[in-house]
Amino acid sequence: MNQKYKDLAQEQIDLIIRSAWEDRTSFESIEKVLGLSESDVIYVMRRQLKPSSFKRWRARVSGRITKHRKLLKQSQS
């Protein structure tokens, strides 16, 4: 991820952060549009946010079904 991260423009980083904070944007959607896996998004968020903001974000998205399409599909079954 380090090389991918270094190649990102600030506008792309801003888009990643906005998308990651949005409840309705899944990690799969972020990967499809931006080409970054969930672990890549976590890496960017860890590097860009203050530690307290990162912890708040992780607590918010961990296990949230709208951030993971697989969990969303399972809950609808």
Image (spheres, rainbow, N blue to C red):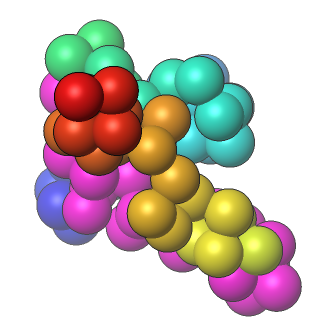
Residue 30 position (above or below residue 68):
above
Q: Is residue 54 left or right of residue 71?
A: right
| Residue in the picture at 59% in, 71% down | 58
- Asked if the magenta segment contains residue 49, the reply would be yes
Q: Can you tell which quarter of the image residue 65 is in?
A: top left
- Relative placement, left or right, of 33 versus 52 is left
Taking the image as shown, residue 65 lies to the left or right of residue 27, namely: right
User: Residue at position x 33%, y 27% from top?
Assistant: 76
Is residue 24 visible in this depiction of the protein? yes
> Quick check: 48 above or below 41?
below
On whether residue 10 falls in the magenta region, the answer is no
Q: Which residues are magenta?
A: 35-55
Residue 67 position by quadrant: top left
Name the residue at 59% across, 24% down.
24
Q: Position of residue 28 (x, y in %)?
A: 25, 30
Image quarter hosting the N terminus: bottom left
**Residue at (29%, 44%) from the top-left corner?**
71
Q: Position of residue 60 (x, y in %)?
A: 68, 63
Q: Is residue 8 visible?
A: no
Characterize the magenta stretch by its predominant secondary structure. Answer: helix
Q: Residue 75 in the image: x percent, y percent?
A: 34, 38
Say which of 22 and 70 sits in front: 70
Report the quarter where the C terminus lies. top left
